[in-house]
Image (spheres, rainbow, N blue to C red):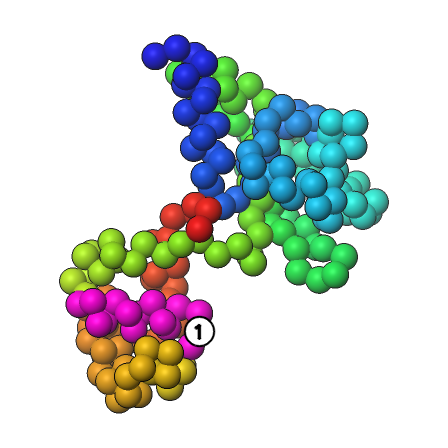
Amino acid sequence: MSDISRADMLETTLDALALGVFLVEVDGRVLFMNQIAERFVRSGDPMRLANGRLTLRDRTQAIDFHGVLNRTVTCGEAGAPTTSTIALPRSGGGGLIATVFRHRARSNEQIASALSAPISILVQDPALVSRLPGEAFAQLYSLTQAELRVAMAMVPGATPLSAAESLGISCNTVKTHLQRIFEKTATSRQADLVALMLRTTPPLVA
């Protein structure tokens, strides 16, 4: 397989992710960003590009951000932890979560070439919802189709009553299904069930 086709495959894979991927130099110069990352910088809040370098709209936050990039490299050279997670608030509230880390040396030359930038930044928007793998989850825990519908209805944080209304069944039926779901998934309450389902959700664009 040629280097070009491998690069195309890697780019296609990264574009399918529901999180922004930036490969940058220590000064913030962007060498690569996937489609979600491009969407983030086009908005300009909180992230933007300035002369090809990734920075933040707020000046104080930008200084802190570039400090993190520098520490990621210098700490890595000293053998210290090389991963940092930081909040990137938007001006109107909410915002993004960024995980910054330094690349480790790779023996695979083709991968090492693709990841020639010293720093990766993974950016998540809590408001972006990935598609739940409902059928696979049901197969994993032997849920019936009726139980799966109830489980999926509970994920947005619905109550048994609101889930019953949306599914067109009685509240008692929802509670009965929930009890069986709890037993099959070794959970005991709705919050644990929802957390389990979200952990099985791939970070892909819905």
Q: Viewer-proximal residue, 194 or 149? A: 149
* Picture residue at 39% right of the left edge, 68% below the top: 155
Give the quadrant of residue 57: top right
> Circle 1 is placed at which residue position?
157
Q: Position of residue 12 (x, y in %)?
A: 45, 30
> In terms of secondary structure, where does tag 1 sit?
loop
How many numbered marks are there? 1
Q: Viewer-proximal residue, 179 or 10? A: 10
Q: Viewer-proximal residue, 56 or 68? A: 56
Q: Residues within 10 Å of mark 1 (few under 14, many from 20)?
A: few
Left or right of 182? Residue 19 is right
Q: Is residue 111 above or below residue 154?
A: above
* Picture residue at 43% right of the left edge, 45% below the top: 204
- Magenta residues? 144-158
* Picture residue at 43% right of the left edge, 33% below the top: 13
Left or right of 58? Residue 87 is left
Q: Is residue 151 magenta?
A: yes
Left or right of 202? Residue 91 is right
| Callout 1 amino acid | Gly
Q: Position of residue 64 (x, y in %)?
A: 75, 43
Q: Is residue 42 magenta?
A: no
Q: Main secondary structure of the magenta part?
A: helix
Spot the residue most to the top.
2
Give the quadrant of residue 116: top right
The answer to whether any part of residue 205 appears in the image is: yes
Q: Position of residue 181 (x, y in %)?
A: 23, 72
Q: Position of residue 2 (x, y in %)?
A: 39, 10
Q: Viewer-proximal residue, 131 or 73? A: 131
* Picture residue at 28% right of the left edge, 69% below the top: 149
